[in-house]
Amino acid sequence: MKHFQQYRFGFDAWGLLLFLIVMVPNFLWFAVSSPNDVLRTESVTPIIDAVGMVFQVLMVVTLCCLVRKDVQSLHWSGFVWSVVVCVTIYFAGWVLYYCGIANSVVIVLLTVPPCFAFLFYAFDRKNLPAILCAVVFTICHVLFGIINFIQ
């Protein structure tokens, strides 16, 4: 219980912005198919997907609504640079996907970097609840990608 005294309910706009930036390609994907759109197949991991979705929501809520009292405002740290690199790699994966490339490497680019971006951001903010939720979400998201798309 002592650990939760380090947090306060607040609003982290940067956490929300990170989530929205990561979701932009997904919104595009919902509207526009790619030439080799393998992601539109039925998932064979519904339980993993459901657990992942729950922890994704919990991750976003904890990133945006729980703020450590002892953490300064956002600045260019190694973790923040890592977030930028991960998001850039993730966007590169979407570019490849929309160029019709849907191999194992592209699937990894669409699953691992966004999860690591959230993890790096949570580490930068010293947000343990968000880290724990992001770890579970990452495991589920990576398992989903491997089991459904990498043979």
Image: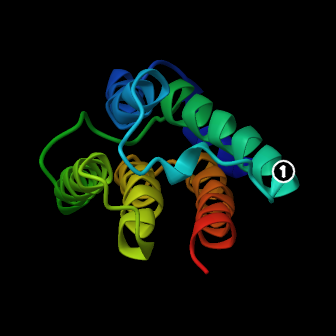
Q: Quadrant of residue 7?
A: top right
- Furthest toward the left, the residue is 76
Q: Secondary structure at mark 1?
A: helix
Q: Which residue is mark 1?
A: 46
Q: Tell me which residue sits at (63%, 48%) in the image.
A: 129
From the viewer's perspective, is 47 left or right of 89? right
- Furthest toward the bottom, the residue is 151
Q: Tell me which residue sits at (29%, 56%) in the image.
A: 93
Of residues 24 and 104, the one drawn nearer to the viewer in this rendering: 104
Q: Position of residue 135 (x, y in %)?
A: 61, 62
Q: Quadrant of residue 27?
A: top left
Q: Position of residue 28 (x, y in %)?
A: 37, 26
Q: Give above or below for 114 relative to 104.
A: above
From the viewer's perspective, is 21 left or right of 122? left
> Quick one: quadrant of the C terminus?
bottom right
Q: Amino acid at mark 1?
A: Pro
Colour scheme in use: rainbow
Number of labels in the image equals 1
Q: Tell me which residue sits at (24%, 33%) in the image.
A: 73
Q: Residues within 10 Å of mark 1 (few under 14, many from 20)?
A: few
- Furthest toward the front, the residue is 35
Of residues 110 and 85, the one drawn nearer to the viewer in this rendering: 110
Q: Position of residue 99 (x, y in %)?
A: 23, 51
Q: Give above or below for 17 relative to 93.
A: above
Q: Tell me which residue sits at (67%, 68%) in the image.
A: 143
